[in-house]
Amino acid sequence: GTYMLVLTVGLNVLTKSVAGAFSISASLMCMIYALGTVSGAHFNPAVTVAVVASRRGKCSPEEGAKYIVVQLAAGLLAARTYCLLTGDTFTSLKPAGSDWTQVFIAELIWTAVLAFIVLSVATVQSSLSEYFGLAIGLCVTVGGCAIGGISGGSLNPAVSLGIASSGDLRAVWHFIPYAFIELSAGAMAAGLFYVTQPSEFQTEWMGEDPAAEVEEGAGVLMKEVSGLDDVVPEGSEAAFKAEKLILPSVQK
């Protein structure tokens, strides 16, 4: 998945495609739907950091480290491929017309937005699996169109490594600040997710089997309801009203 994403980025940029942002986002969306059930669609080290940092058991630090190693290796392999196919290379990862402050701000904001979108649509308890690939892909389109002219719109350390390693070797060090800010953005996205989605972190009090505990609690409540017979005569109007009010909420 990471290989196809980075390959698509390189081919679009080096061939000066007029619809690069749309092509890249479509590639990502297709890979998410194709491989989401295989690897969780971990195609971006920044997103992997966000998932690990959210600390909900979705991805352990050890597993996340393995994902990142494979992602970076795929970025390098894809770079070799698009250079071979086009016979061309990148001049530099950082656009010549931008300074580092502009690059840092642009990459920080939009990488954080991308990682936050992934957390919010793909890792929540009630995710809409039919649509999250589209939401994530469109986020890449928005980011690419918005900051492509400022920072290149990498939003992904694997993409950054591929571009940096396939250009002027004197500028290969550009990968380091890009990767640092993108990984930091992933961690920041986890913090934003914690603040905006508190319900995703409120299951611990329910124990290991929330459904069983809810059922048990409902049973206790039913016993309490049945105890109304001692206070309100069965068949009376008051008993009927109490039953009508309480039982539907228990059955839900």
Image (spheres, rainbow, N blue to C red):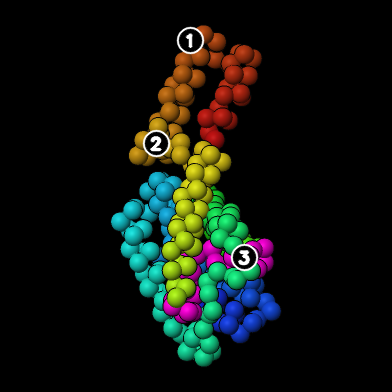
* SS of the residue under disc 2: helix
> Could you say whether the residue bearing mark 3 is in a helix, strand or loop?
loop
Residue that numbered label 1 is attached to: 230
Q: Earlier in the sequence, mark 1 or mark 2?
A: 2
Q: Residue furthest left?
A: 62
Q: Position of residue 52 (x, y in %)?
A: 40, 52
The structure residue drawn at horizontal position 46% and vertical position 15%, both measured from the top left corner, is 227
Q: Characterize the magenta stretch by its predominant secondary structure.
A: helix
> Percent position (x, y) of residue 194?
50, 41
**Residue occupied by mark 2:** 204
Q: Confirm whether the magenta stretch covers residue 161.
A: yes
- Name the residue tied to disc 3: 98
Q: CA distance from mark 1 to mark 2?
A: 37 Å
Residue type indicated by callout 3:
Ser
Residue 195 location (% of width, % of height)? 53, 39
- Give whichever of discs 2 and 3 has the lower sequence position: 3
**Front-most of residues 77 and 32:** 77
Tag of residue 23: none
Check if residue 40 falls in the magenta segment: no
Tell me which residue sits at (58%, 16%) in the image.
Answer: 239
The residue closer to the viewer here, 131 or 97, is 97
Q: Tell me if residue 76 comes above or below residue 203 in the rendering.
A: below
Q: Is residue 251 above or below residue 238?
A: below
State the separation of the CA atoms marked 3 and 1: 79 Å
| Residue 128 seen anywhere in this rendered image of the structure | no
Q: Are marks 3 and 1 in contact (CB under 8 Å)?
A: no
Which stretch is magenta?
145-169
